[in-house]
Image (spheres, rainbow, N blue to C red):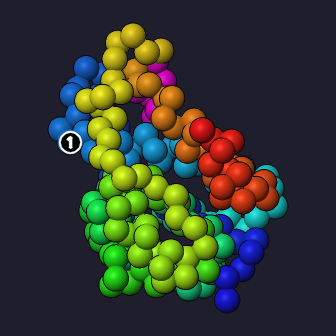
């Protein structure tokens, strides 16, 4: 039975912070590293709103993810990780959710995935299996290639300054925070957009 005051956040951190002047070896690691910090904002908002908010460790395993779903039994799961049309991954690209394989675990929950392409198959499959709502992306995005520019103000993370366009992250935080404030997913979407 889903517990209405419990929420779960998961965001792997599997790329060491870049050194000054270093180019990312794999920009996808930079994406998850930065999203890791933004999800923290929603985790803190959940705690402020009186939710029992659990955040998985940076290097969480598939077993830890499913243990948290089963024992914490959250109404809301907000995860950041790489994905494709049918798959959401966690630490070191370990498959966590896969359409028509194990997505029934999201039944009775609001699922928000900051993950490329998952709204194409995985999201609808979650809802078809009884998920309350799915929030996610139908497109693939590349934070480094599209959003990096010397023109943007620096944003410090772990002692490194990134020059990124944060306009796409603000709606992410607004969406989840509006749900935490008691708004419906549709109302939250309208607030965020």
Front residue of 65/21: it is: 65
Residue in the picture at 55% in, 49% down: 39
Note whether residue 61 is visible: no
On the image, the x and y values in percent for residue 123 come to 43, 67
Which quarter of the rendered picture does the C terminus lie within? top right
Residue matched to label 1: 26
| Depth check, front residue: 139 or 28 | 139
Q: Residue 70 sits in which quadrant?
A: bottom right
In the image, 7: left or right of 11?
Answer: right
Q: Disc 1 on helix, strand or loop?
A: loop
Query: Magenta part mainly helix, strand or loop?
Result: strand
Could you tell me which quadrant the N terminus lies in? bottom right
Crowding near the residue tagged with mark 1, few <14, some 14–19, many ≥20 C-alpha atoms within 10 Å: few
139 left or right, relative to 1: left
Where 188 sits versus 66, above or below?
above
**Residue at image x 68%, y 42%?**
191
Q: Position of residue 187 (x, y in %)?
A: 71, 51
Picture quadrant of residue 183: bottom right
Q: Which residues are magenta?
A: 154-162
């Amino acid at each position: 039975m889903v517990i209405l005051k419990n929420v779960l956040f998961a965001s792997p951190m599997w790329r060491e912070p870049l050194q000054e002047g270093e180019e990312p070896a794999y920009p996808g690691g930079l994406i998850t590293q930065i999203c890791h910090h933004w999800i923290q904002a929603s985790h803190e908002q959940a705690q402020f709103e009186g939710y029992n908010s659990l955040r998985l460790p940076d290097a969480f395993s598939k077993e830890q993810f499913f243990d948290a779903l089963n024992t914490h039994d959250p109404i809301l799961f907000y995860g950041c990780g790489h994905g494709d049309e049918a798959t959401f991954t966690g630490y070191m690209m370990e498959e966590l959710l896969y359409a028509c394989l194990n997505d029934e675990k999201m039944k009775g929950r609001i699922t928000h995935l900051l993950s490329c392409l998952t709204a194409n198959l995985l999201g609808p499959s979650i809802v078809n299996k009884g998920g309350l709502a799915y929030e996610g992306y139908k497109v693939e995005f590349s934070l480094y290639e599209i959003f990096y520019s010397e023109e943007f103000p620096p944003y410090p993370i772990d002692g490194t300054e990134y020059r990124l366009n944060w306009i796409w992250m603000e709606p992410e935080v607004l969406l989840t925070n509006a749900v935490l404030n008691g708004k419906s997913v549709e109302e939250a979407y309208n607030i965020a957009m």
